[in-house]
Amino acid sequence: MRERTLKWAMIAPAILILLILVIYPLMWSVGLTFFDYSIMLKRAPLFIGVENYIDILNDPSIWDNFILTAYFLAIALPIEFLLGFGIALLLYEEFRGRRMVLTLLLIPMMLAPIAVGVFYRFIFDSTFGVLTYLLSIVGIRGFEWYTAQWVIPSVALVDVWMWTPFMVLILLAGLTAVPRYLYEAASIDRAGWMMKFRYVTFPIVKPLIGVAVLFRTMDIMKVFDTVFILTSGGPGSSSELISFRVYREAFQYFHTGRAAALSMIFLVMIIVLTNIYLRFLTRRPAEAAVTRELEV
Amino acid sequence: MGSKRRGKTIKYVKYLLIAVLTAVWLFPVYWLVVTSLKTRLEMFAIPPKWIFQPTLDNFIGVFYERRYGLTPGPTDFPRFLLNSFFISLSSIALVILVGMLASYSFSRFNVKGKDTWLFFILSTRMLPPIAVIIPIYLMYQRLGLLNTYVGLIALYMMFNMAFAVWMMKGFFDEIPRELDEAAMVDGYSRIGAFRKAVLPQALTGIAATAVFCLIMAWNEFLFAYILSGFDTRTVPVALARIRGESGVEWGTITATEVLYIAPVIIFTFFLQKYLLRGITFGTVKGK
Amino acid sequence: MAGVRLKSLSKKAGGLCPVFDLNLEVADKEFVTLLAPSGSGKTTTLRMIAGLEVPDEGEIYIGDELVNDLTPAERDTAMVFQTYALYPHLTVRGNLASPLRARKTPQNEMDSRVKDVADILGIAQLLEKYPTQLSGGEMQRVAIGRAIIRRPRVYLLDEPLTNLDAKLRVHMRAELKRLQKELGQTMIYATHDELEALSMSDRIAVMRNGRVVQYGTSKEIFEHPENLSVATFVGTPTMNLFECMLSEKAGQAYLESKLFKLSITELAERIRDKAAESGLILGIRPSDLEIHTQETREGFVQGEIYVLEPMGAALVIDVKVGEELVKVKVPGSLSLEPGTKVWLTFDKARMHIFSKKTKETIV
C-alpha cells in the first residue's frame, strides 16, 4: 500500500513544475487574449471578447507573416531533406573514420542558434564577409544578403547548415535498419537499383522520413533565435516570421493582449502538428520501425 | 577486372566527396576560430587572409578590455560566463534529480493514466517558448522573479523537464524489472532497490541525458533575454546585445563565441553514442 | 523455516497469467513443484508468495503468519529468477552479500557467510568476477547462493534450470535436491519440465489455466492421474488415448471402439454411471504396452509397425492401428522392422479410463 503513495510522490515534483510553469501560464495567456491589455499602459485590462482574434485575422501583415513562414519552410525543408538524404547515402557504407565524420557533422546542430546567427552576419557581410568573397569568385558580384529578396533564403541557409545533419542522422539510421538480406534477395530477383529503392528501401525508411519531416516542420515554425540575431525581422518586416512577430507585438509594441492571441493561434497550429506527429509515432508499424535498435 | 577497377575509383571518389563535404560543412566553424585569432585589420581584409600570424589579443579582450579613453579593467564577460555556468548547472542538477524520480516511477509502476501523463509531458516540450513567455513574464514581474537566479533556474527546469523524463525513462525501461525485484526480495525497500540495483546501471544514460540538457540550457536565448537583467545575464544574451551596439567589436565577439561553443563541441564528442536518441527525444534508438 | 499455505488465491488483472481460487499447502521443509506449461500461472503464484504481486483475493500464510500486507523484504523469502537477475555492476561477492547488506549485517559476518556459501556451491574461485564474465551454470549458482545466504523461511525458484544446457540441467537437478535436504528448507519450485518435477519433488502441484489440477507425490501423479490433462502432461511419450463406449451384453461389459473390444466386466460397476453421461476415453502409457510378433489370446489391438524411434536405452515404436498411431515404449535392445505385423497387450491394472469430460475412474 505504501507503494501507491510512493509512485505518485515520485512523479509529483516533475508534474508540479510543469503545472506551475506551463499549464498555469498557458491558461493565463488564454485568458489574456480576451482583454485589451498592455504592460506599458497604466490602466486596467479591458474585456473585449474575441476582438483581438478578429483584429489579427483581419490584419494583412499577419497573413504576410504566415506566408513568410511558409516560404521559409518551403525553402529550408526540401533542401534539408534532399541534401540530408544524399549525404546519408554517401555515408551509408562503413568506412574508417565514419564515426568521426558523423560526429563532426553533428556539431552545427549542437551550437547555440544565437552564436551561429551572430557569426553568420560576419560571413554574410557584403563588405568583408567570406561568403560574399567566395561568391564573387564564381562571378556573383555585390551580393547583398540583407535585402527583401535574399533575406529569407539567407536565414534558410543558416537553418539548413545547422539542421541538415539532423536529417542525415535519422535517414542514415533508417537506411542502415534495412536488413541486407532483403537487398540480396532483390538482387537475385534481378532488381535494378531503382526497384530496390522503391520496394525495399522506401517502405522501411518511410516512417523515419515522416518522423524527421514532421519534427523539422515543427521546429522550423518555431524558429526565433536565428531570426532575432541575424535580421531582427528586417529589412522592415521581410523576415518577420511568426514567432518573431509575436515577440514584436509583445515586447516592442507592447500589445500584450494581442500578442497573446497571436501566440495562441500559433500554439494551436503547433498542437495540431504535434498530434499528427505523436499519432504517427504510436501507430504500430511505425512504432516498431522507430523504436527498434538501429545501426548507425 | 574492369569492374573492380571501377569499384575502386568509385570508392576514392566517394572518400573525396566525403572529405570535401566535411570540410565545407565545418568551414564556418573553422572560419570563426580563425577570425578570432586575427587582428582587427586582418579580419576585414578583402580578399580574406588565409595565412596570417595568430594572436590572442581578442581572447584577452574578452576578459580585460582596453577601450580608448577609458581605464583598462576587467570586462563584464566573466560575470556572464559565470551566470551561464551557474544557471545551467543548477537547473540541470535539479532537473535530473526531479526527472529521475518521475521517470523511474513511470518506468516501474502502473500509474493510472500513465500514457496521458507521458503525452502531456512530451507535449510541453513541443510548444513554442513564445507561447508561454508572455504570461511568464507577467507572472515573474508580479512575483519579483525577474532578474533572479531562482526565476531562471526554475524556468530552465521546466524547459528541460520533458526531455529529461523521456530520455531517462527510456534508459530505465532497458533495465529489467527483475533487478528491482531481486533487490526487494533481498531485503531492500523500493527506494533502496532503486538506489542499489537500478541506478548504478542507469548512470551512463543519466549522464548522457544531463549533458544534453546542459547543452540546451547553455544555448538557451529567449527566456534568458526576456527574464534576466544585468545581474543574471547569460552569455547568449550578452552576445545578442553586443550586436546591437554601434561599432561591433568582431574580434571580441568571435573570441567570445569560440570560448562559448568550445565546451559544447567537446561534449558532443562524448555524446556520440546517444546523439540519435537525444535529438529525437528518445524515440529512435541508435547503437 | 516454515510451511506455506495459500487460501483461495486469485489474481486476474495485471497482464499476467491469471490464477483462480488457488489452494495449496506446503509443509515445512517440503520440496513442492508447481508443474505447468507456460502461461498457467505458476510464475504468478510464486511472485504472489514473494510479495512482488498483490493478489486480488485470497490469503497467503508463511508459517502461521498472514503475509498479504507485508513487503517482499519483510516476508523473509528468497527467490531465484529464471533469468538469475544478478546485479551486473557488482562482483559475485557483492551479489552474494547483497541480502546481508540489505539487512545491515556486520562486515565480518558477511565475509564469513559469503565464504561458506561459495564453498558449498563451489564458486569460491569466482568471487571477484562480474556476472558478465560467468557462464550460465556459474551465474545460476551465484543466484542460488544469493538465495541461500540468508536462510530465509521459504525458497522460491522460478524455472531456474530452463536456460541451462541439457547435461548441466541434469547435474543441477541432483545438486538442488541435495542442497534442499541439507539445508532443510521449504522450497517451492516452478517448472514446465515434468522430469524435473518428478525427480526432485516431494509433492507436485500440477497446474493448468491458473488452477491446481492435482496435488500429490510423483508416484501419485504418474500412476494415478486424476484427470486427462495431468495424465497427458506427465509422461514421455504421451499416454495413448482411445475413444470408446461402454457396452453391456448378457452380463458382460466391454469397452468398445472401432479398433478393439475389451472385456471389463469387473469394473463395470464403477464405470456405468459415468459412462452413461458421456463417452469414455481409455488411456495406456506407452511404457505399459507390450508388443508381440505373434498373435496372442489377450490381444488388445493388432497393427503394423510404422516407424521406429531409437532413443538409446529405450525404443519407441509407432504402431499403426487402423487409422491411429499407437506409441509403445520398449527396451532398446529389441530389434524389429517397420511393416511387421504386431499385436499389443497390456496389464489391465495399469489402464486409465476417463470420462470424456476429463475425469479418471480407475488405475
Image (cartoon, coloured by chain):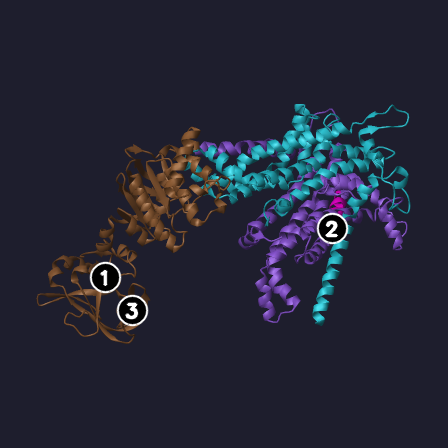
Question: The residue tagged with tag 1: helix, strand or loop?
Answer: strand
State whether residue A31 appears in this view: no
Question: The residue tagged with tag 2: helix, strand or loop?
Answer: helix
Q: Hue of chain A?
A: purple
Whether labels 1 and 3 belong to a single chain: the reply is: yes
The chain displayed cyan equals B
Which residue is the site of mark 2?
A76
Badge 2: chain ID: A
Three-letter amino acid code of the residue under disc 1: Gly
- Per the rendered image, the range of residues in magenta is A62-74
Q: Hue of chain C?
A: brown
Which residue is the site of mark 3?
C318
**Location of residue A127 in the rendering, given as x and y in whole percent from the top left corner:** 89, 44
Distance in Å between CA atoms under marks 1 and 3: 16 Å
- Say left or right for B246 vs C240: right
**Location of residue C361 in the rendering, given as x and y in whole percent from the top left corner:** 18, 56
State whether residue B251 appears in this view: yes
